[in-house]
């Protein structure tokens, strides 16, 4: 099979395409796959094709870690997506073309994050980031977040996110 221009082969996810050479020794993509921000990574599940299994097993894992006295931090990547435009791995541009990604002065999607930059300065992309983070905190009980290239997010959006997650945390404890 010949790789397509994005560096993946038919049937592969972007992340598995990037680690093709490592598959013999490491079969996981470790979840760093910014296609669907709020979906638990399938390679950790006993049945990756079943979304319900992904959710239940991820929640059980977090609960077990909490019972063991550990807090759970999650690395999140809202500053870019794997693809943009009408690429098969582009999700957001299929909803509203040209809105969710940051454009440069020539009208092309900016790639200073090494991928297609998201435009969290746009209301709905900021909302997607906020809602996704609150979902991870509220529904999965994630305790903290590490934001990849946080400087690409507007300060106001990050302040709002912090406020919403803290309010969720106070509600959970109360």
Image (cartoon, rainbow, N blue to C red):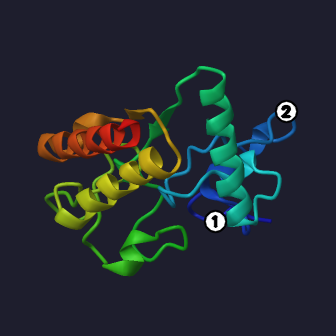
- x and y, in percent, of residue 97 in the image: 31, 78
Dot 1: what SS? Answer: loop
The quadrant in which the N terminus is found is bottom right
In this view, 85 is above or below 76: below
Question: Which residue is the extreme one toward the top?
Answer: 69
Other-residue count near label 1 (Cα within 10 Å), few / some / many at <14 / 14–19 / ≥20:
few
At x 41% / y 79%, what residue is drawn? 94
Q: Which mark is residue 130?
A: none
- x and y, in percent, of residue 138 in the image: 43, 49
Q: Spatial distance from mark 1 to mark 2, Cα to Cα?
A: 24 Å
At x 35% / y 38%, what residue is drawn? 174
- x and y, in percent, of residue 126 in the image: 24, 57
- The residue carrying mark 1 is 4
Q: Is residue 66 left or right of residue 143?
A: right
At x 40% / y 66%, what residue is drawn? 84
At x 61% / y 45%, what residue is drawn? 31
Dot 2: what SS? Answer: loop
Other-residue count near label 2 (Cα within 10 Å), few / some / many at <14 / 14–19 / ≥20:
few
Looking at the rendered image, the disc whose residue lies closer to the viewer, 1 or 2, is 2
User: Which comes before the other along the chain, label 1 or label 2?
Assistant: 1
Q: Quadrant of residue 159?
A: top left
Q: Is residue 150 left or right of residue 116?
A: left
Q: Which mark is residue 25?
A: 2
In this view, 29 is above or below 106: above
Q: Quadrant of residue 93?
A: bottom left
- x and y, in percent, of residue 154 in the image: 16, 45
């Amino acid at each position: 099979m010949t790789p397509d221009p994005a560096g993946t082969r038919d049937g592969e996810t972007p992340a598995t395409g990037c680690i093709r050479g490592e598959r013999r020794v490491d079969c996981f993509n470790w979840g760093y796959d910014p296609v669907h921000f709020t979906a638990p990574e399938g390679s950790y599940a006993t049945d990756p094709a079943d979304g319900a299994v992904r959710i239940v097993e991820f929640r059980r894992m977090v609960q077990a870690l909490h019972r063991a006295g550990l807090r759970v931090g999650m690395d999140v990547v809202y500053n870019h997506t794997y693809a943009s435009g009408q690429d098969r791995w582009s999700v957001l541009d299929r909803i509203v073309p040209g809105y969710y990604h940051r454009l440069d002065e020539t009208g092309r999607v900016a790639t200073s994050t090494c991928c297609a930059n998201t435009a969290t300065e746009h209301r709905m992309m900021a909302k997607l980031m906020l809602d996704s983070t609150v979902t991870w905190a509220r529904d999965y009980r994630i305790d903290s977040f590490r934001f990849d290239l946080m400087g690409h997010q507007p300060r106001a959006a990050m302040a709002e996110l912090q406020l919403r997650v803290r309010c969720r945390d106070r509600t959970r404890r109360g």
